[in-house]
Image (cartoon, rainbow, N blue to C red):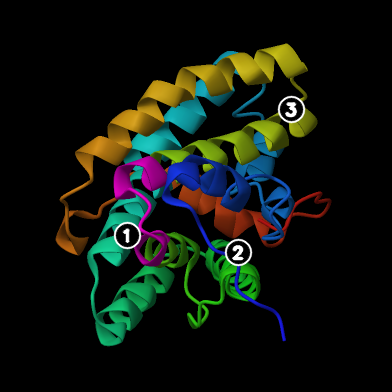
Amino acid sequence: MDVPIPMPTDTHHLTLMQWLSPGYPVGAFAYSHGLERVVEQGAVGSADQFETWLTDILTLGTGRSDAILLHCAYRTETPHRLVELDDLARALSPSSERRMETELQGEAFARTTAAIWGSEDAPLAYPVAVGAAARRAGIDATMTCAAYLHAFAANLTSAAIRLIPLGQTEGQTVLARMTPICHDIAVQTAHLCPDDIGSCCFAADIASMQHETQYSRQFRS
């Protein structure tokens, strides 16, 4: 029988690095969050255009919404309330691909984390799963949220490098500019509730719907 691995409190930042690294088997590399469609349409074709798109996604779209969901999951003390948050997270998905993106990554995260650290969480949408896991592990919520957002931005940057294409240095320069944005969102959303969730990234939402029928695709969303 496998014995759960203890989590020393002075290594919490390293645990977050593991949870949110490309090597953690959630399949994040398979999703572009609609970016593949906007590149195909010609709306994003340079580092500057990608930076604008990514900034909007983080500050006005999924980034901010996921941050609120993660913080709410962290503060949740009852399984029933966690299920309600999970239902909301799934309902907020504007397309079937975006719902698949959060569901499958969340399921994979919960399954892997349970196998290693001995948790028993049911499959949850990705930000809800990460928030619940961080609470259980005693990892700071704001630090978790900032790391989650940065990992999200890093995955989309990797997709942009392949799709546009961007040079590695160009892509990493854009990602470096996202670091303070991720931190600010994590701080600003720390005490918000589900009623504060809102998004106005309509072009990205429509792109995710159109991606479902795009003829040639590298990504699942």
In the picture of the structure, the residue carrying the numbered disc 1 is: 69
Q: Earlier in the sequence, mark 3 or mark 2?
A: 2
Q: Position of residue 118 (x, y in %)?
A: 56, 76
Where is residue 43, by image quadrant?
top right
- Mark 3 or 1 closer to N-term? 1
The picture places residue 89, in percent across and down from the top left corner, at: 38, 68
Q: Classify residue 24 as left or right of residue 120.
A: right
Residue 132, quarter of the rendered image: bottom left
- Asked if residue 146 shows in the view, the reply is yes
- Regarding mark 1 in the picture, which secondary structure is present there? helix
Element class at badge 2: helix
Q: Is residue 141 magenta?
A: yes
Identity of the residue drawn at 40% across and 47% down = 144
Which range of residues does the magenta coloring cover? 134-145
Q: Are marks 3 and 2 in contact (CB under 8 Å)?
A: no
Q: Which residue is mark 2?
A: 105
Q: Marks 3 and 1: CB-CB under 8 Å?
A: no
> Disc 3 marks which residue?
161
Label 2 crowd (10 A; few <14 / some 14-19 / many >=20): many
Q: Where 25 sits versus 200, above or below? A: below
Q: Residue at x 67, y 60 (%)?
A: 26
Horizontal arrangement in the rendering, residue 152 relative to residue 88 (left or right): right
What secondary structure prevails in the magenta region? helix
